[in-house]
Structures are given as C-alpha cells and as structure tokens.
Image: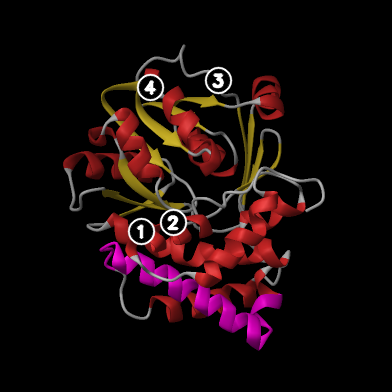
C-alpha cells in the first residue's frame, strides 16, 4: 500500500512508522527540525516493548509524491485548513484520508476540500509523543483507532483497510456511528486539554479539589448538551463515564495531562478553536448555553498563537 503521512508528529510517526515497519511504502511530510532528523537518521519508534529504527522517505511537499492509497492526516487542528489544500496531489480515485485530530470539525472540512467519498471518520484510541525531532515515544499499550463511514454504517473499503492496519500492528474498531465516537472523545478533551491548559496543571490536582471537580463535570456537561443539540447520539451517562475514566487513569499516571497543557507551558500555539472554541460556536448556533467553556476559551485567547510567557 502507498501511504502518505501529513503531519509526522507523535501520532503520524506512530501510525506511519508501524505501516513502514510492516513493509508498506510510506512517505512522511514534515517540516523544520523534524524533517531534517527524518532525512538524516530516520524515524525512531520507542514502543513499550521495543525500539524500532526505520529509514523512511521524508519531504516538505506532497506535490512530488503522487496519488496514494491512504493519507494519515495528523496535523494540529490550527494547521488543518492549509494542510487540506496541500494534500490535493495525493488524492487518486480510491484514496482514503484518515483525519486524526483533537476536537471536532476536521473531517467535515476535509470533505469540502478533497470530496466526501475520500474521507473516513477516525478517532485515535491510544497515544504517542514526539519527544525529539524524529523520535516518537509510545508509553500507552494501546495502538488503536476507531474507524467509520461519516454517514454511518460499514463498507467493504473499511473492512479491507482494517485488515491492512491490523497486520501492521494497529488495532481497529469499526463503528456504525463514528460521529458518536468523535464527539464523545471531544467531550473529555474539553477538560483534559482545555481545562488543564487553563490551570497549567495536569488532571490529578484538578480531580483532587472538590470545586474544580465540579468545574470539570460542568465543562463536559455543556459539551454533551451541545453534541445532543446537533443530533449526535451520545449515550446517557457520558459525563459520569469520563469522570470515572479520568480517575482511573490518574491513579495509574498522576502526571496525566492533555497535549494543550504542554503546549501552553512551552509557548506553542493552541488547538483551542476545535475544542472549547467549538463548544462555544456550536452552542451559540444551537442556543445551548456554554458559560464554562466560554470562560476557558476567552481566558486562553491571549495564548492562542503561542506565547513565551505561558
């Protein structure tokens, strides 16, 4: 299979690296120091049980690659619009694009650029971090994604793709309602990314304080209400399930925090618009109050484009 990875950070490096390790023809599209590292010494995957070193093709432009079978679209959400235009040369008649992002809205944006027939709904169910240029570290044992047709249901192309990914060491859960999965994860990232960035604290201190626990619960409740108003079939008890899950994860890893926590501490741009900003925008459209998400959104606005004084 010919594969392109747009956004060769943690998740792009993980999924693209696993497919390259399995023998697929994978090209990484990267920038800056990461591109230089990939070209000079290749990709290093630090897995829980192994360290893999791969010599991989890397470029800063999709234009010379030509059409591929699969595009892992793993850029940050603030780069998604520009990156969607960049991947146009990668799209052939049968190309599948998998958007792996935090937040909501990327898949719909991609359909408007490359066509709805090419975009599959996707949710990352594991984790990976680019700890240095060209070096991706994976601490979580899960290397899995949920996939589904954006309009719902299953399809032969998804079943075929799932088999290929599974053979590459990537677990796949095929979902009849992938929109539910996308928005369900968004509910919790409004806290694990947005609230952690606001407090400049990992989840453990937030869940150790009764007042901030109520705040986290309220932020997620607003997000659920927005999703329901948009017709997303989130199950009853979504907030309680995520609260319980967060406590379980904190017990295993007291330093647990979402990527935007690290972004603000290091003065990087924030994926705010697709997370708490989405709650505010979609809430206004649907007439759903989101005062807690608005507070997070407004308070983080000064840091949206990065700041060395985070």
Residue shown at the point (39%, 71%) measured from the top left: 224
Residue bearing the label numbered 4: 88
In what element is the residue under mark 1? helix
Discs 1, 2 touching: Cβ within 8 Å:
yes
Indicate which label's residue lies in the foreground, 2 or 4: 2
In what element is the residue under mark 3? loop
Q: CA distance from mark 1 to mark 3?
A: 44 Å
Residue bearing the label numbered 2: 281
Residue 43, image x, y percentages:
63, 31
Marker disc for residue 12: none
The answer to whether residue 167 of the structure is visible from this angle is no
Indicate yes or no whether the magenta region holds residue 211.
yes
Residue bearing the label numbered 3: 57
Marker disc for residue 285: 1
Q: CA distance from mark 4 to mark 1?
A: 31 Å
Residue shown at the point (47%, 53%) measured from the top left: 103
Discs 3, 4 touching: Cβ within 8 Å:
no
Residue shown at the point (43%, 30%) measured from the top left: 84
Indicate yes or no whether the magenta region holds residue 84.
no
Left or right: where 65 falls relative to 32: left
Indicate which label's residue lies in the foreground, 4 or 1: 1
The residue range painted magenta reads 205-233
Q: Earlier in the sequence, mark 2 or mark 4?
A: 4
Q: CA distance from mark 1 to mark 2?
A: 6 Å
Q: Earlier in the sequence, mark 3 or mark 4?
A: 3
Q: Earlier in the sequence, mark 1 or mark 3?
A: 3
The residue positioned farthest toward the top in the image shown: 64
Classify mark 1: residues with Cα within 10 Å, few (<14), some (14-19) or many (20+).
few
Classify mark 2: residues with Cα within 10 Å, few (<14), some (14-19) or many (20+).
some
Q: Which of the image's four quarters has the N terminus?
A: top left
């Amino acid at each position: 299979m010919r594969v392109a990875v747009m956004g060769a950070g943690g998740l792009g490096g993980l999924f693209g690296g696993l497919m390259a390790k399995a023998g697929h023809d994978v090209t990484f599209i990267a920038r800056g120091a990461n591109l230089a590292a990939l070209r000079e010494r290749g990709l290093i995957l630090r897995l829980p049980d192994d360290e893999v070193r791969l010599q991989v093709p890397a470029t800063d432009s999709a234009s010379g690659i030509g059409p591929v079978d699969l595009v892992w679209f793993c850029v940050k959400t603030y780069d998604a619009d520009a990156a969607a235009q960049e991947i146009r040369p990668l799209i052939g008649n049968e190309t599948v694009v998998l958007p792996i992002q935090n937040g909501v809205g990327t898949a719909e944006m991609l359909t408007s650029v490359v066509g709805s027939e090419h975009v599959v709904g996707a949710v990352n169910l594991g984790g990976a971090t680019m700890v240095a240029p060209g070096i991706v570290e994976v601490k979580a044992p899960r290397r899995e994604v949920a996939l589904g047709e954006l309009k719902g249901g299953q399809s032969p192309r998804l079943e075929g793709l799932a088999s290929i990914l599974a053979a590459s060491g990537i677990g796949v859960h095929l979902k009849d309602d992938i929109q539910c999965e996308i928005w369900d994860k968004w509910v919790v990232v409004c806290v694990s990314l947005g609230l952690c960035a606001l407090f400049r604290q990992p989840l453990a201190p937030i869940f150790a304080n009764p007042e901030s626990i109520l705040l986290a619960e309220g932020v997620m409740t607003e997000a659920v209400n927005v999703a329901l108003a948009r017709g997303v079939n989130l199950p009853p008890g979504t907030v309680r399930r995520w609260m319980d899950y967060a406590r379980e994860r904190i017990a295993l890893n007291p330093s647990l925090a979402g990527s935007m926590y690290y972004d603000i501490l290091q003065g990087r741009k924030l994926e705010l618009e697709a997370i708490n900003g989405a709650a505010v925008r979609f809430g206004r459209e649907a007439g759903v109050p989101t005062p807690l998400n608005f507070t997070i959104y407004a308070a983080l606005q000064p840091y949206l484009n990065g700041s060395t004084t985070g």
